[in-house]
Amino acid sequence: MKEKLEALRTQALAELEAADTPKVLEEFRIRFMGKKGPLTELLRGMGALPAEERPRVGQMVNQLRAELETALATREEAIQSALKAARLKEETLDVTMPGKRAAAGGLHPLNSVLNNMIDIFQSMGFDVVDGPEVETDYYNFECLNVPKDHPARDMQDTFYIGENLLLRTQTSAAQIRTMEERKPPIRVICPGRVYRADEVDATHSPVFHQIEGLVVDKNITICDLKGVLEQFAHEMYGADTKVRFRPSFFPFTEPSVEVDVSCSACGGTGCRICKGVGWIEILGAGMVHPRVLKSCGIDPEEYSGFAFGIGLDRLTTTRHKISDIRLLFENDRRFLDQF
Ligand code: PHE
């Protein structure tokens, strides 16, 4: 009996020694210590022994069981801590490795130039207003004194959505909405997208941006227009920038002007940015036509005003010396990351 127990002990300890995963260990526990294991069997078989031997054998079996239980627990602990060590090793963090920089967004160049312009006009007392991009023929053309046969109304130039509905071709539509809603004194700018059926090339895009400006009050003259726009140009391009007013024509202003600034890239001597002429056209403007004031319920005998429309895209490309307007709309990160 003693030899039998000794053999069992040797075998069990050897198997325990060899067990290297929790699974093998569990199998061992079931096989040796379980209800059908050799230890239980030995205890059960004790009935066949002479009565005086039973206590001794019982004691030996129990001793072996206790010993194996301890050995099992020790082994289990060893396996768990080996597993933990392996896992820690695998998950080690190299704190000296350079971190990944989170890609931070930035303002699109159009937006940063726009914000700049809004600051300038707000400091002169202008409010910022908004207008719809889908406009009626009435607000975009009719009320702005654009006659029915004007070429701008052509399907070739304007995106029509319905007979009287279109994508606004100019932010000037916002002038009318403003004058209908507010009473003078009025001092607003309205930045936004405008649409024209243009072919895409380096200087044209079917969608671009304007900032409309409108001032209506008593005794507003063309000197006010000149003063405001000169101030704007100097703040935008620098105090030594020259500003030039050329006579022009718009159906909704009389008289009308176009405004150029001396090219900031070459200082006026002529370069690639200004196409060799030394000047860059940045806006159209004029005194609001009395007929337009009247159709908005403002008495042209009492009030006068001026309006201007600045091309944001042109301003942005010249300011940042960008050679192709398409770059502003392609959203190529390699381009945008430069700003
Ligand atoms: N709306 C005109 C254009 O798109 C610009 C403009 C605005 C002219 C306001 C005069 C007054 O060309």
Image (cartoon, grey):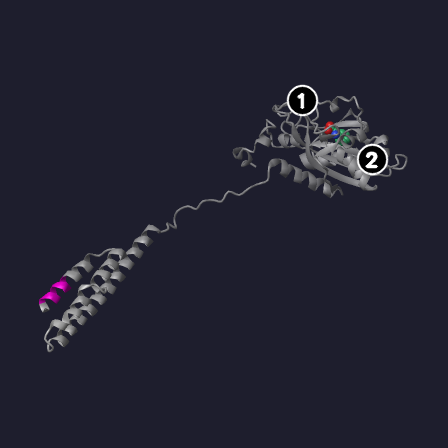
- Say which amino acid is labelled 1: Val
| Location of mark 2 (residue) | 305
| Location of mark 1 (residue) | 277
Front residue of 173 and 103? 173
- The region drawn magenta spans 3-10
The mark that comes first in sequence, 2 or 1, is 1
Q: Quadrant of the C terminus?
A: top right
Element on which disc 2 rests: strand
94 relative to 316, above or below: below
Tell me which residue sits at (73%, 35%) in the image: 212
Residue 5 percent across, percent down from the top left: 13, 67
Q: Can you tell which quarter of the image residue 44 is in?
A: bottom left
Q: How many marks?
A: 2
Q: Is residue 221 left or right of residue 116?
A: right
181 relative to 267, above or below: below
- Say which amino acid is labelled 2: Gly
Residue 20 percent across, percent down from the top left: 23, 55
Within 10 Å of disc 1 (Cα), the crowding (few <14, some 14-19, many 20+) is: some
